[in-house]
Image (cartoon, rainbow, N blue to C red):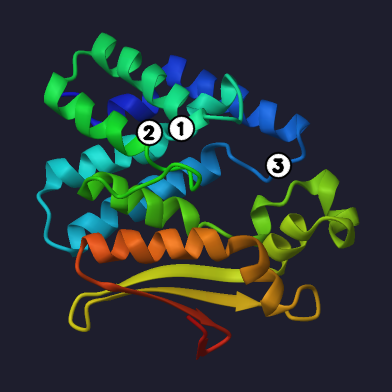
Amino acid sequence: MVTFKEVRENEDIKTYIRMADKTLESMKFTEHSFAHVVRCADVAGNILSDLGYDERTAELARIAAYMHDIGNVVNRIDHAQSGAVMAFRLLDKMGMKAEEIARVVTAIGNHDEKTAYPVNEIAAALILADKSDVRRSRVRAEERATISNDIHDRVNYAVEKSKLAVDVQNKKLVLYLNIDEKISRISEYFEIFLERMMLCRRAAAYFDMQFEVNINGATVM
């Protein structure tokens, strides 16, 4: 059985994550390196654990989330699909069973908002984890002086705190955000992330749950 620990310690996978982030750095994208993928792995696995899925399914979600952006090393366009193909080869080489590989690559191939769909529980958890990762530390140091020129950097930098909470009793997944409105208006968040939030709503519906966004103490979606 291939574990999340083995995947996280695999030097080839580390190289692809590192080089994919370098590609996006050159294109002025926010951070997509280890801080992002480890956080996504934690959140995706915790979502499934909190919802009562077995530990192996939660572990497969962590694996998918950790590897989900490696396709950016090829090209940003269609990176979900190229990443899924890369993940297939890597996990097959590591000895993962075909059925488990299929679940992981399906999730990776369905996480980008242009083509995403929560086709299984791992894909749904990955979508929620990935699209909810908005935070100040994702803005690269060299871009912080010019956040007024880039709405994506400005919105991410304005988010002082973010947390995705699973409310099993009320059947809700709630994204809590603290946004410094002196840096970015709340309307700007939805200007660039509305498609992602609608995708999160669809992913939550896979679990028969509602998705809500709470910004600065008020439910806005």
Determine the image quadrant of residue 50. Answer: bottom left
Q: Residue furthest bottom?
A: 218
Residue 53, horizontal then vertical, whole percent? 12, 54
At label 2, the amino acid type is Gly
Q: Nearer the viewer, residue 56 or 199?
A: 199
Residue 132 appears at what percent x and percent y? 48, 60
Q: Is residue 70 above or below residue 90?
A: below
How many other residues sit within 10 Å of disc 2, few (<14), some (14-19) or many (≥20)? many
In the image, farthest residue toward the front: 115
Say which quadrant the N terminus sits in: top left
Picture residue at 90% right of the left edge, 55% below the top: 146
How much space separates mark 1 and mark 3, taking CA atoms? 16 Å
Left or right: 138, with 41 as reference point: right
Residue 60, above or below 49? above
Q: How far apart are labels 1 and 2 at the CA level?
A: 5 Å
Q: Quadrant location of residue 52? A: bottom left
At label 1, the amino acid type is Ala
Query: In the image, which disc is placed on residue 80?
Result: 1
Which residue is found at the position 65% from the left and 76% from the top?
Answer: 179
User: Residue at label 2?
Assistant: 109
Whether residues under marks 1 and 3 lie with C-beta atoms below 8 angstroms apart, the answer is: no
Amino acid type shown at disc 3: Phe
Q: Secondary structure at mark 1?
A: helix
- Label count reads 3
**SS category of the residue bearing label 3:** loop
- The reply to whether discs 1 and 2 touch (Cβ–Cβ < 8 Å) is yes
Which residue has dot 3 on it?
Answer: 29
Which residue appears at 61% of the width and 24% of the height? Answer: 75
Question: Which label is found at residue 120?
Answer: none
